[in-house]
Structure formats: structure tokens, C-alpha cells
Image (cartoon, rainbow, N blue to C red):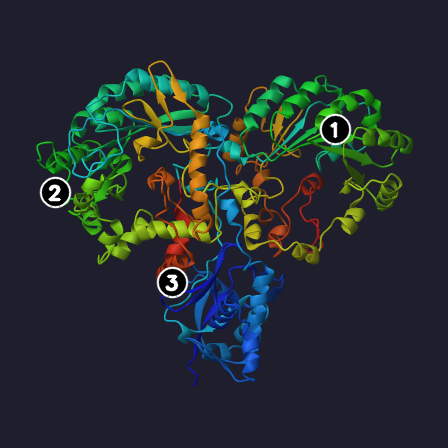
């Protein structure tokens, strides 16, 4: 495939070699003609030695044509124009053993310690807009269930099937607002501190709205928690984050953050970060300016989840929903924000995904690099293997591979007596989804670089059609946009290659 | 005055090497090379092209090119070798870029040096790709090469004195540890593996994992353990049998062994271990006489046959270029040893080694494989015992001065066993 950037530079992309190469306009035209079944040399002969005009370039002689024709042949001999074997990217199958092995090597366990919350944020994933969650009725996670799951996992983490040595296992606490159930958090921390892990050690993390931070910061610091605080910017920007009586939470949260910062300044900077939701009351630039001015901590943006919206609430939902990309459009600081954040902005994420997928320079590990996985088959889309990254225990005792997916994707459950995960059923379920996708993926030109989780695209609906399907025209446009951006910011290429890691 | 200007670009598939005052370029697509001595202007130009902000493209004025013969000749050479190009700047408004070849290895252990949060032990077993198990050290033969050949290539070996046998308990542990790993090959050797007391259990245990296995047997041990061999080999249908043969061959034993092999319906690979010129001829006679079509030669360095190696093993520039490595393959050889990386050997006494030419990294009786690999990674940069996985030609004498050092195959066990790094005819001897 050949494409031009907005700056009128020409490139060749070879899917088989997974390489992008800047090419001369004459070579660009030769390949383009060839793609349309025309041999430029034949055309040249018809002109009886006159020069040929190349668009946006000028007239070229027969010797120039001959030179670039030879170069074209060199690429051809080296398989640059060979059709990609798409099947490789969609033929992977999950086995129960593979999922079980993932669980054995899981490094992140997240407990939804309560579904209660002391805020009533307008855009909450458990708000009136959504249909895909279990009923929230101020439940607390049973300590017996939580410890049962820990025991179950410790048993398998200590087996020889664990592929790691001296590696962190992160225990995360999530809600609702997790600080509404601190007794359970304390119990889990105390319990896990007494466990003898053969190959791992525990660390702790929490995602909080910060309302109760003043009461529990000593405990969190003492146990070396990493803390992620949800805050959408200044008071005006944060106005969707309200108490049940509709009053703003900003003052309380801001005061608590300042208290934390004052009491534990070093810890605060190193272990506290922020997450901000972009919506109709703020912009990415507002949020960026706010954190740059007020704190020296890491922060990231996210969007309100647009999946699982009730049909009847769609219109209302759109009144609060705003895409980060739209928020950045027109921002004077767009480039500054994108360059600083690298990943975490749509264009940054797109660039990272593009460079990792289409430039042939990114490898998982040394074995990947030494070609030993040449014949490996991949799964369609960017969906994780269940439990490869995370295991999430909901307040009702259901087990999920992630906290960010709908309640229809539970893969098991915990009772006070046992942990039940049906690995075969999980494998069948995922393989069924893969089958549903494979035909669409087969003709999707972005099959190699698809970063989307299939569980976030409504895969279990009957008439499922991938909303991210891309044909050749789409891909050309995507490549053109990204390469234009890179031409104008070439320093980003090395920065991403050297500094951005996908873990 | 002609004010025309060009984007001058080097292709991303061209390997560039600069050693002192010498510049070398290699086109990985057509194998063409260019070499320039003592041309600092060209080295500066190439370094400018390689700058992070330039990404292999710079602007050159026509006047500059025409007024500098070295530059214009260089560009002419580059274009002739399809290693780069000149593109009229009027054809585009902003400089094009080339995707400069990089190796972005997500689990690169070098990240640990600059990122405190990088977890070196995560999925550590994924480093493993080949497992070699010496199940015992018992054998009745007295081959001259026994004590040294196994350090050069996969070959049986015995020890006089202490008799060891790796118990089934440890074999089971190994299997459990690698069952879901990325090991793509298991090699099983002795001594004489037929003397392993629980060979049947060993074979059935190994048959429980879906990883290709190769069993190494010396041809002299076939006939002496005839019944056991027949019994065992029935179970080896999915595995590869490697029969090791060295000279002088006992023709009568060989004659008796061949019907045995054909009778049990296995299709072994014969590895002829050669030390001298005449061994090559003898091999050819043997394979023709016995109708063997699946065989290979493996050279053995006996300490005295360097001329033989120089003639038959040493590689030339032509050999190196003929292998046509990709730019990724070339660059990867600066990061990891592609021949030795990922291989762990377990000796019959339980010692774990990442390379047989160096000391152990643990013992299976007290260390898990995972722990041994962890040491391998953690200590890899500190000690020669551990660093064979990352032993690259850029680190060793002679090779580090050679432009071909990354195009050339990675350092092999032969080089480690022989104590010299350049089995080639490119630079001088070490």
C-alpha cells in the first residue's frame, strides 16, 4: 500500500514486512500504477521517449523510470508487495489450560469492597444512564469471600506453574467508594501480610474519590498504598462530582488532598496520582492547567464510558458526554499536552499503537525478537487473555477479568466456601466471540493493530457489527494523518520507542 | 546559480556501522556493501542523518553536493546500491521521515537499569526456550572426545568416578515448570540414556508435554542395550532420535545396529562428528553404503585441528552476507546472543547451567529453574558465569572492531570452548 501525507511526502507500507518507507514520487507512481494493473514502462514506450509527468513532481526521463523500476523490483523480490497472511492474526484459540495458566500468573487482584458511594456523580458507570451493572444497594463485600479468593489464588501462585520470581502482586481496592469499607481493606491487608508467597510479594493500591482521605491517610501511607484520586479539575470543572444532596464535593476533596500533601509531601508526590474524566463541564486543557498549576503529580484523562447506555437515556447522556479528541480540538495547548503525556491522549495513544503495530520495531521479549514465535497465532482484536492482567471480584462475589466491563462477562463466582471458575466455559465463550469477529477481522485492514477490547464493543449482541472496522481507505487516511503528525514532530518517534512501555 | 535542494535519505533497511574513521553500510535487501576509510565528512553526514530529529533524512543544497566530490560520490554510491535517495524538496512542504530501525523490547532487562519499577522477575520463565537434560553420566564407552565435545555441541558425556542419575522427582519438577512456558525444544542426553534406571517412566513423563523432544544416543550404545532400546523406542514415535557417530567408526557394530534401527521403524538423524578432512570422505562412504539420507556433519575441535576448522568451519565475508539477515536480526545481535539465549542445561547431578562452558547458576535439588533464571538475569551483567545469553560480538576483542560483527552469527559454544571469538577470515586471530 502506498500513501501520501498532507505534506505531500510519499510512503510505502508493506504488511508482510511490517515496514513503512519514505519513497520517491516516481516509485510511488510505479507502485500505484502496478496496483491498478498498469506497467509504467509500457506507458513510457507508448510516449516514444517523451518525458512522463508525475503528479506534484514534474517530468521524468526514461532513465529515471528505469532506476525506480529496478528499485520497485528490489522491494518485490523482498516480498514487500506480498499479501499478508491475515489468518495468523485471527486464528488463535483459547484453551481452558491457557486461561488457567493466566490466572496462575496473574499479578493484579481487585476487590470491589462496597457498591456504596458517598458521592452521586452524574456520569457514574452505575448511574441511571446504564443498564449493564448489578443493582447497587449499599452492599459490602463479604470478608469470607475475599479471603476465600485470596487463599485460592495463593495456592496456585505458589505452584511451579507460576512463571515469575520475586514479582509484585498488586491488591487493588475499588468501589463504590472503597474507603466506606475500610475494616475490610484493613483485614485483607493484615491477612495478606502474613501469607508466605514463594515467588511474589504483595503491594496495595486504591482508587478513591478522596472524600474520606483525611480519616484514612495514615493507614494508607503506613501500608504503602498507591493512591489514585478521581478529580476532574477545579470546582467548576469538577461539578458533576457531587454529594447525594447535590452539593459540590470539590472543597472537601481539595482540602483533603492539601492535607495529605502537607503531612506526607514526599510520599504524596511519588505515590498519589489523579484521574480526570473529560465531560461537558471541563476540557482537557482545563484539567491539564489545573494539575500543572496545583500539583506535581502524575495525572491521566479518561472518558465517560459510552457503552451500556439505556436506549431511553441516550439523548440525555449525550448532554454530559464529550470525547477527549473533541475536547482537544481547538486547544492552543494541544501539542504541548500530547507531547508531554505521549500516551493518554487519543492522538498519543493512536501514535503509540501505530508505532507498536506497523513499524516492526516492537517486541514483547527476546524470544519474540529471535523469531521463535514466527508461527504463533494471535487472537483477534486487542482483548486480553482472561486473568492475564487482572482478576476482579465484585461486591456480589462475581469474578471478572477486569472491572471495566459489563456484568454479562462474569467468568466465575466466589461463595464463602469455594471459588468456582469454569475455565472450559470461559474458553468456549471467548472462542465463540472470536468466531463472531473473525470474518469481519479477516477483511479489516487494521487486523494487526486493533487495540480494542471485544468486551467493550457489544460483542454479545445478536447482530454484532464491529464499530471499529477499517477498510483500506480508512487505513490510508489513518496512516496519512499519523505520518503527517510525525513529520511535523519527528522527536516523538524516538521518544515513544525509548520511553513508552505497554505494561 | 542553481538553488535546487533535496531531501537526502538513507533507507531504514540499511545497516550502518562506524568504527573509528571507517564507515560501512550494508543493504539488507540486496546484500550490497559500501565502505569508506578516513572520510570524516561522510561519517559526520551519516551521524547527522541518524540524529533523533532527522530520522535518516536531511536537506542538502544542490550547490553543496556539487561542490564536494566526496559527498557527491557518496550519494551516487548510495543511490546505485538502492541504499538511499535524493528527493526534490519542491515535491513536499515538510521533510519526510524514515522509520529509523529501533528495537523496542518491552521486557528488555536493560530497562531495570533505568526504571526502578521494572519488574525483572515477571513472567521470567518466558526467557526459557530450550531445555537440555543430562539424565545420567553412566556409559561403558571410553571415547576420547567425551570430556570436551559436549561443551561444543549437543553430545553425550560421562564422568568417571561419581555416578549420577537425575531422579524422576526432578524430571517431574522440570516438566511442571516448563509445561506452559515457551520452551520449543527439549534435548535428552546421557551418558548412555538406556542405562537410566527409570527410562520408561522418563519417556512417558516427557510424553505428557507437547514440546518436541530429541533423544541423543551414541551409536555404540545401540547394540549393547538392544532389548531395552527396542522397548523404549516404541514409545518415542513423536520424538526425534539423534544418533551420534564419531570416527573411527566400528563398521561391524554399525552393520549390526542398522537393521535394528530400520526394524523399529524410527527415522533417526545421524550426526557424524568430524575432526579432519578424511572424516568427511568416510561419512560420505558410510551414508552411501548404508543408504542413510538423514544425516549431518558436526565439527569437533580437539585442540589440534585448527587448520581443519580454518578450512571448513571459518566463515568469510561472502558466507556472512549470503545469510542475508534482516535489519532487525542484525540489531538484535547487539542486544542478545541469538545462539545461546534462553537455553538451560541440567546435568545429572542437578547442576543448572546456562552454558556448559561456564560454572553452574544453581542446582535443581535446592533451586527452582525460575530462581536460577532470575539469577541469570539479575547477575547477567556482572559476571561472565551468567552473561552468555547477552554475550555479543560488540563486547569481545577482534569482533568489536569488525563492521561485520552484527551481521555475523552470534558467538557460539565452539568459540567459548575454543577460547577464541572469531571463527572467520575477516580480521586477525585472537
- The residue pinned by badge 1 equals B157
Q: Nearer the viewer, residue B342 or B17?
A: B342
Whole-percent x, y for residue A327 in the image? 22, 52
Q: Nearer the viewer, residue A496 or A242?
A: A242
Q: Is residue A232 left or right of residue A351?
A: left
Q: Residues within 10 Å of mark 1 (few under 14, many from 20)?
A: many
Q: CA distance from mark 3 to mark 2?
A: 39 Å
- Give the quadrant of the C terminus of chain A: top left
Q: Is residue A471 left or right of residue A177?
A: right
Find the residue positioned furthest to the front: A463
Is A270 above or below relative to A101?
Answer: below
Whole-percent x, y for residue A238 in the image? 15, 42
Q: Residues within 10 Å of mark 2 (few under 14, many from 20)?
A: some
Is B153 above or below relative to B99?
Answer: above
- The residue pinned by badge 3 equals A487
Q: CA distance from mark 1 to mark 2?
A: 76 Å
Whole-percent x, y for residue A220 in the image? 25, 26
Q: Residues within 10 Å of mark 3 (few under 14, many from 20)?
A: many
Tag 2 subunit: A
Q: Nearer the viewer, mark 1 or mark 2?
A: 2
- The residue pinned by badge 2 equals A235
In what element is the residue under mark 3?
helix
In what element is the residue under mark 1?
loop
Amino acid at each position: 500500500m502506498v500513501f501520501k501525507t498532507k505534506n505531500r511526502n510519499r510512503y510505502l507500507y508493506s504488511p508482510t514486512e511490517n515496514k513503512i518507507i519514505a519513497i520517491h514520487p516516481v516509485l510511488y507512481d510505479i507502485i500505484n500504477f502496478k496496483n491498478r494493473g498498469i506497467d509504467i514502462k509500457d506507458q513510457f514506450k507508448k510516449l516514444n521517449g517523451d518525458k512522463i509527468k508525475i503528479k506534484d513532481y514534474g517530468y521524468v526521463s526514461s532513465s529515471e523510470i528505469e532506476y525506480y523500476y529496478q528499485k520497485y523490483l528490489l522491494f518485490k523480490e523482498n516480498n514487500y508487495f506480498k499479501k499478508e497472511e491475515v489468518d495468523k492474526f485471527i486464528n488463535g484459540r483459547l484453551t481452558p489450560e491457557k486461561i488457567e495458566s493466566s490466572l496462575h500468573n496473574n499479578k493484579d487482584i481487585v476487590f470491589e469492597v462496597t457498591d456504596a458511594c458517598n458521592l452521586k456523580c452524574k456520569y457514574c458507570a452505575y448511574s441511571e444512564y446504564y443498564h449493564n451493572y448489578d443493582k447497587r444497594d449499599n452492599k459490602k463485600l463479604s470478608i469470607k469471600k475475599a479471603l476465600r479468593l485470596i487463599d485460592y489464588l495463593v495456592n496456585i501462585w505458589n505452584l511451579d506453574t507460576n512463571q515469575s520470581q520475586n514479582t509484585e502482586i498488586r491488591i487493588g481496592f475499588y468501589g463504590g467508594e472503597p474507603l466506606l469499607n475500610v475494616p475490610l481493606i484493613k483485614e485483607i491487608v493484615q491477612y495478606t501480610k502474613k501469607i508466605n508467597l514463594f515467588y511474589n510479594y504483595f503491594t496495595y493500591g486504591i482508587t478513591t474519590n478522596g472524600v474520606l482521605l483525611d480519616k484514612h491517610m495514615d493507614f494508607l501511607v503506613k501500608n504503602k498504598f498507591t493512591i489514585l484520586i478521581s478529580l476532574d479539575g477545579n470546582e467548576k470543572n469538577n461539578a458533576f462530582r457531587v454529594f447525594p444532596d447535590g452539593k459540590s464535593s470539590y472543597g472537601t476533596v481539595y482540602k483533603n488532598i492539601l492535607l495529605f500533601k502537607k503531612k506526607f509531601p514526599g510520599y504524596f508526590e511519588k505515590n498519589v496520582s489523579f484521574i480526570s474524566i473529560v465531560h461537558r463541564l471541563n476540557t482537557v486543557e482545563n484539567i491539564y492547567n489545573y494539575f500543572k498549576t496545583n500539583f506535581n503529580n502524575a495525572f491521566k484523562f479518561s472518558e465517560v464510558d459510552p457503552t451500556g447506555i439505556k436506549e431511553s437515556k441516550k439523548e440525555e447522556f449525550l448532554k454530559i458526554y464529550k470525547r477527549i479528541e473533541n475536547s482537544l480540538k481547538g486547544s492552543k495547548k494541544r501539542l504541548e499536552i500530547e507531547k508531554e503525556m505521549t500516551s493518554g491522549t487519543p492522538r498519543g495513544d493512536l501514535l503509540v499503537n501505530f508505532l507498536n503495530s506497523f513499524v516492526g520495531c516492537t517486541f514483547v521479549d527476546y524470544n519474540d525478537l529471535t523469531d521463535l514465535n514466527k508461527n504463533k497465532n494471535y487472537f483477534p482484536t486487542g482483548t486480553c487473555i482472561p486473568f492475564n492482567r487482572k482478576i476482579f471480584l465484585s461486591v456480589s462475589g462475581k469474578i471478572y477479568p477486569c472491572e471495566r466491563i459489563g456484568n454479562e462477562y462474569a467468568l466465575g463466582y466466589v461463595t464463602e466456601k469455594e471459588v468456582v471458575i469454569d475455565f472450559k466455559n470461559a474458553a468456549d465463550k471467548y472462542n465463540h466471540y472470536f468466531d463472531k469477529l473473525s470474518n469481519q477481522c479477516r477483511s479489516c485492514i487494521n487486523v494487526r493493530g486493533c487495540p480494542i477490547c471485544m468486551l467493550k464493543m457489544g460483542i454479545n449482541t445478536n447482530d454484532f457489527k464491529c464499530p471499529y472496522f477499517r477498510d483500506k481507505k480508512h487505513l490510508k487516511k489513518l496512516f496519512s494523518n499519523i505520518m503527517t503528525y510525525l513529520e511535523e514532530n519527528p522527536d516523538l518517534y524516538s521518544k515513544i520507542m525509548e520511553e513508552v512501555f505497554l505494561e | 546559480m542553481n538553488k535546487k535542494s533535496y531531501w537526502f535519505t538513507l533507507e531504514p533497511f540499511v545497516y550502518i556501522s562506524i568504527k573509528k574513521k571507517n564507515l560501512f553500510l550494508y543493504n539488507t535487501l540486496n546484500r550490497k556493501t559500501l565502505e569508506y576509510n578516513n572520510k570524516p565528512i561522510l561519517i559526520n553526514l551519516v551521524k547527522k542523518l541518524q540524529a533523533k530529529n532527522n530520522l535518516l533524512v536531511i536537506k542538502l543544497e544542490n550547490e553543496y553536493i556539487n561542490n564536494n566530490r566526496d559527498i557527491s560520490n557518496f550519494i551516487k554510491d548510495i543511490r546505485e546500491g538502492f541504499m538511499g535517495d535524493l528527493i526534490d524538496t519542491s515535491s513536499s512542504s515538510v521533510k519526510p521521515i524514515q522509520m529509523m530501525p529501533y528495537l523496542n523490547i518491552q521486557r528488555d532487562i536493560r530497562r531495570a537499569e533505568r526504571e526502578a519499577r521494572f519488574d525483572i522477575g515477571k513472567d521470567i520463565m518466558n526467557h526459557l526456550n530450550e531445555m537440555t537434560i543430562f539424565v545420567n553420566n553412566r556409559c561403558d564407552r571410553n571415547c576420547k572426545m567425551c570430556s570436551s565435545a559436549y561443551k561444543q555441541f549437543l553430545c553425550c558425556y560421562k564422568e568417571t568416578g561419581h555416578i549420577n542419575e537425575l531422579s524422576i522427582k526432578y524430571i517431574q519438577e522440570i516438566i511442571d515448570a516448563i509445561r506452559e512456558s515457551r520452551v520449543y525444544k527439549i534435548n535428552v542426553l546421557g551418558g548412555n540414556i538406556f542405562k537410566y534406571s527409570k527410562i520408561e517412566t522418563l519417556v512417558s513423563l516427557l510424553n505428557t508435554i507437547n514440546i518436541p523432544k530429541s533423544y541423543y544416543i551414541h551409536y555404540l550404545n545401540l547394540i549393547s542395550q538392544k532389548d531395552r532400546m527396542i522397548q523404549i523406542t516404541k514409545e518415542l514415535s513423536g520424538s526425534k532420535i539423534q544418533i551420534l557417530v564419531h570416527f573411527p567408526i566400528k563398521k561391524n557394530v554399525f552393520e549390526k545396529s542398522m537393521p535394528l534401527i530400520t526394524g523399529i521403524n524410527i527415522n533417526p538423524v545421524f550426526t557424524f562428528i568430524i575432526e579432519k578432512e578424511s572424516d568427511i570422505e568416510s561419512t560420505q562412504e558410510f551414508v552411501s553404503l548404508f543408504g542413510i539420507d538423514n544425516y549431518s556433519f558436526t565439527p569437533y575441535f580437539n585442540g589440534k585441528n585448527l587448520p581443519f576448522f580454518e578450512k571448513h568451519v571459518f566463515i568469510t565475508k561472502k558466507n556472512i552476507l549470503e545469510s542475508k539477515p534482516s535489519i532487525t536480526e542484525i540489531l538484535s545481535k547487539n542486544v542478545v546472543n541469538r545462539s545461546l539465549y534462553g537455553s538451560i542445561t541440567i546435568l545429572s547431578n542437578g547442576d543448572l547451567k546456562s552454558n556448559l562452558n561456564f560454572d553452574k547458576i544453581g542446582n535443581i535439588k535446592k533451586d527452582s529453574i525460575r530462581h536460577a533464571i532470575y539469577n541469570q538475569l539479575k547477575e547477567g551483567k556482572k559476571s561472565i558465569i551468567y552473561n552468555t545469553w547477552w554475550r555479543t560480538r560488540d563486547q569481545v576483542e577482534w569482533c568489536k572492531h569488525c563492521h561485520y560483527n552484527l551481521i555475523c552469527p552470534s558467538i557460539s559454544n565452539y568459540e567459548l570452548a575454543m577460547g577464541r571469538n572469531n571463527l572467520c577470515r575477516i580480521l586477525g586471530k585472537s
